[in-house]
Amino acid sequence: MTKKTPIILLLALSISSITKAQVIDTSKYQKPVNFTTQQDHQNMMQQLGIKKLRPGPSGNENAPNAANYDEAKANPCPELPDLLTTKTGKKISTAENWWKERRPELVNMIEQEMYGKLPANIPDVEWKIKITDREFIGRTPAIVKQIVGHVDNSAYPLINVDINMMLVVPTNVKGPVPVLMMFGFPSFPAPAQPSPADLEKINTAFKALMIKNDPSMKDIFDRYPAYSPITRLAVANPFTATPAGDPSPTEQLLAAGWGYLTIEPASIQADNGSGLTKGIIGLVNKGQPRKPDDWGALRAWAWGASRALDYLEKDSLVDARKVGIEGVSRYGKAALVTLAFDQRFAVGLIGSSGKGGATLHRRIFGEAVESLTGSGEYHWMAGNYLKYGTEESDFGSKTGCNLTTDSHGLLAMAAPRLTFISYGIPEKGDAKWLDQTGSYMATVAAGPVFKLLGAKDIGVSNDYMREKMPPVLTGLLDGHLAWRQHDGGHTDAPNFKYFIPWATKMLGYEKKSN
């Protein structure tokens, strides 16, 4: 067998795979709907009998429809639904009754009205490690695994979903280790590179291949005999002095003996309305539009995170009882939804999540319910959520005040697990639009449930209308429910140096070096 044979076999296999993909009998399957975002949004309005939605406010404070930033007008319905009273008026006073009666009520309401229900027929995910690499990240040696989860699409092969993620685990500590899962964009942090001797062999072979393909290349290489087409990437020397400022959040995690996993939301579900007939939502619906109580993108991203946790439970490097979830902005919303619905997650870092996250829906301050019911962000939520931005419809008009619960209920669903709410400041870019105060009120209001379940809340009274948000840089970190507003922008990075020791202590994790 010649050296060319393996390449020929690979080409043959590739051609065979392409041929198989091309011979799918598409007539056997209902064609997927290819709506634009506007068409999908209009379709949902028609399903709900909505004739007109109220327009969302502008973030431009000088615009005619500028968002409200007057606290005197921010609470049109200040009394929140009581978390410890059932729909029938029964008072919940024991943990047993919380788990058996009130929490299931909240789950049902929040699924039905806000984020949507998981369908019963979601296909399985098969995880495969694509690449395993040994790297140095800062000063920490690590194993890095590129992992792909293929969702079984045998029932509807016209839509393919492959979940992308990257697991990084330190190798200088005794495992298994806690892991923080983060919504983001996976990449190898510091890919290992060939030694100089190996790189020289690669360049020699590459030059020969180029000359064989184009003989004129020989003259060029002869003129530049010391030139190498492929050079090593510039990487930081782990033994040099530490640069000024805080290390990156991921370096801080590794230094503390934590691992981290980055999962790509877009590989689960697109972040737009036109993608709702694609991704995991489209796959389950066989390419057809959603029904009003179907899940939105936030719940889909959370489902993907839960499937990633399924994988971590089988990885011997990971302590699956100490896995956290993190995200910022829309991914902060998704992180809170993940923590609330999947009780296997031990801790959450919820960054700058705003409406749809930790901020109260019924508050009118900056971002509004109408911001999420318009065609720009409605795909995050269940279709039913559009009802609360309705001006004219078959059922009349509704606002956030008509919701039977609010974001304090979502936070309460996370109890008694570790929940850290993080914000920055408007002056640095964490805009007033996010309504930091509204998130603080929800955090205060969720406290009674944490205490009922034997956990500590943020350590203030639970009077959400009277308690004032603490000054910037004042961390309330003595309980299982925590709050800290840093002096940075639209990020949670400045809070990592507080989050990591808090979570490490509360989880009872002790780093042990190899």
Image (cartoon, helix red, strand yellow):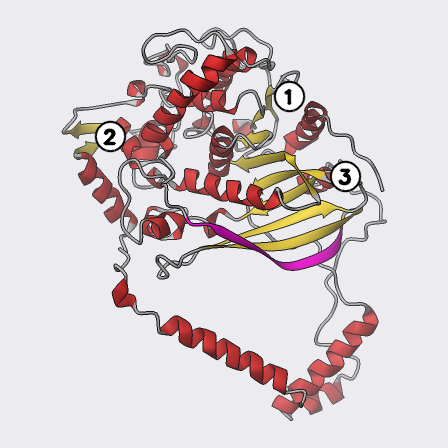
Quadrant containing the C terminus is top right
Magenta stretch: includes residue 168: no
Q: Is residue 416 left or right of residue 72?
A: right
Give the mark nearer the N terminus: 2 vs 1. 2
Q: Position of residue 397 (x, y in %)?
A: 20, 24
Dot in front, 2 or 3: 3
Q: Residues within 10 Å of mark 3 (few under 14, many from 20)?
A: many
Q: Position of residue 331 (x, y in %)?
A: 49, 38
Q: Looking at the image, which is closer to me, 95 or 148?
A: 95
Return the residue at label 1: 473
Q: Residues within 10 Å of mark 2 (few under 14, many from 20)?
A: some
Give the mark nearer the N terminus: 3 vs 1. 3
Q: Residue at x 74, y 77 (%)?
A: 202
Rounded to the nearest angstrom, the CA distance separating label 2 from label 3 is: 49 Å
Q: How many marks?
A: 3
Q: Is residue 320 left or right of residue 163?
A: right
Rounded to the nearest angstrom, the CA distance separating label 2 from label 1 is: 37 Å
Return the residue at label 3: 255
Q: Position of residue 478 (x, y in %)?
A: 66, 16
Residue 276 tag number: none
Q: Position of residue 463 (x, y in %)?
A: 48, 7
Return the residue at label 2: 54
Q: Is residue 496 left or right of residue 440?
A: right
* Relative vertical location of residue 24 with respect to residue 12 in this rendering, above or below: above
| Amino acid type assigned to the residue bearing label 2 in the image | Arg
Tag 2 secondary structure: loop
* Relative vertical location of residue 52 with respect to residue 288 in this rendering, above or below: above
Give the mark nearer the N terminus: 2 vs 3. 2
Magenta span of residues? 123-136
Q: Residue at x 56, y 32 (%)?
A: 344
| Amino acid type assigned to the residue bearing label 1 in the image | Leu
Look at the image and tell me whether residue 57 can be seen.
no
